[in-house]
Image (cartoon, helix red, strand yellow):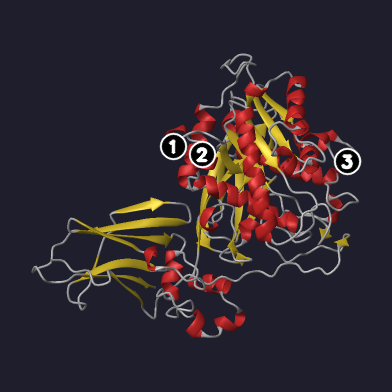
Amino acid sequence: MMELRNALERRASCRALVWASRLPLAPLVASVAIADCTLTNTSRLPLPEYGFKLYQGFSGGLYPNGGNNRPPAHLAAGVSIATNQIQPLDVSGHVNTNTGKVVLLSVGMSNATQEWASGDNVTHDITRAFKYRADRDPSENPQLMIVDGAQGGQDASQWTNINGATWSNVVLRLNAAGVTTNQVQAIWLKEAIANESGPLTNHATLLQIYLEEIVRNANALYPNLRLVYVSSRTRAYVAATGLNPEPIAYETAYAVKWMIEKQISGAASLNYDPAKGPVVAPYLSWGPYLWADGLVPRSDGFAWPCSEVVSDFTHPSSNGVYAVASQLLAFFKTDPTTAPWFLKKTVNPPSLSASAQFASGVAPLTNHFNATFSGSVTQALWTFDDGEFAFAQNPVKIFRTPGLYLCRVTVTDTNGDTALASVPVTVTSTFGFWQTNKFTTNELADPSISGPAADPDQDGFPNLLEYALGLEPKTFDSGSTLNTVLTNGVFTLSFPHLKAATDVTLAAQVSSDLLSWTTLTPTQTVDQGPIETVIIQDDSSPNSPNSARFFRLTATQ
């Protein structure tokens, strides 16, 4: 009879490498409101650039587990919708490939309408906005109809009432454009709560609730809506109080992040997949990530100087409108869930090859990209699979967060023909990088806290295993992190694995005497983005009925 004595012995050798601890970043503190161009640096990192750090106890990254791109299954679902379900529709919602339209609609507040179509509130220069530029881009699908549904003064709360004036006004705008609610298939959503204040867990949670209600309303009102892309706020030059000050503007990203993560986790209240139950929401994804910390450049070189806002230090100036519109254009022309229906069918594509200086490297990784093409190409756009972008042929990008990135480039020639290419870049981690992200300076100097064999949260997982498993060293993890099942004599072990921890060997081993150990080969791995789940099964029978078999998980460098 097989006896499992506490199925796993958690060990890490002194040479083991582990994942590092949570280091919350200090929020901006302002005793009085600041509203001027001196607010050039809040010491915050753009969400895609957090590495393994935490912000007020929460991970960065746009997607689950601190990742910056859609988990494989969610990406595949979005690509399938874009290629198989988005088709030109007539006013009744029937497929018409000759005269039908694909309507791409904006939903949001004043900033959103200005950036999407109406221009800033001083010059009202629509030529700087996304719709004007996209409609004059020769690569745009001629059956695409871009409509501005966003409205000034209508914050998130105003869109939660499905019978409210905001939604009625959208119908008027659709009709004015010669289309109907039946033809709306994609939405760009950007919202905030006016004059909000308080802690992150209050205001961002409330905004998340509002955003979820908005996408459910949109799903009910537009029967053929399939895709919604969400962006958070741009940077404000106002702190503490005001229409949407810092850090509130920055923290709106968490409302977006949490909503999308909730859908990815399978929440019925945001289900988009008819195979999983009633469809109550469209497919959700991040659009471009718009926030940059003033004069501090992002890892793609993008900054948000005070000249990007008007005199209220919140709404975009003409320059700010252009900057956001550029990010929107890069996103819709390169993303695999948008390019199939945003771009026209190409007749004679220009030749294109794309490359990166490094195919892989350790974070932070500075990488030089190159697009080589021939023909009358007039535009090259890059996106880096993390919400960031470049309007350049040969951009430079710093990857500060480990992960696998599929960097995409689209070039357009004078005839509007396009060519698309992608370059995979694998950004890995080291235990040292993890440590500096997770521990304070004093903790790093104390190996009993930050060393590979230390266990600062006393959960039985030494830092080495915390790192390799993708856990937090200062947060107690229960034994259920390692799932064990014994069924009909087959022992099954499953555990998470941080894919970026390539400097660590994580091994499940079995022994009958605690002296001689045999490493087991994984039966299956389930890719979930930055984290994969490893499944191991052992059906070996012990030599005698009363003998025992022992299992352990080791992490070594």
Give the quarter of the image for residue 228: top right
Horizontal and vertical percent for residue 531?
Answer: 45, 57
Give the quarter of the image for residue 275: top left
* Residue at the spot 24% in from the left edge and 72% down from the top edge: 5
Badge nearest the viewer, 3 or 2: 2
Horizontal and vertical percent for residue 314?
Answer: 83, 51
Number of residue marks: 3
Disc 2 to disc 1: CB gap under 8 Å: yes
Horizontal and vertical percent for residue 246?
Answer: 77, 59
Amino acid identity at mark 2: Asn
Element marked by disc 3: loop
Give the quarter of the image for residue 484: bottom left
User: Which of pointers 3 and 1 lies earlier in the amino acid sequence?
Assistant: 3
Element marked by disc 2: loop
Q: Which residue is mark 1?
A: 276
User: Which of pointers 3 and 2 lies earlier in the amino acid sequence?
Assistant: 3
The correct choice, above or below, for 437 with respect to 257 in the image is below
Amino acid identity at mark 3: Asn
Figure quadrant of the N terminus: bottom left
Q: Which residue is mark 2?
A: 271
Disc 3 to disc 2: CB gap under 8 Å: no
Mark 2 burial class by Cα count in 10 Å: few <14, some 14-19, many 20+: many
Q: Which residue is mark 3?
A: 121
Q: Is residue 271 left or right of residue 159?
A: left
Amino acid identity at mark 1: Lys
* Mark number, residue 84: none
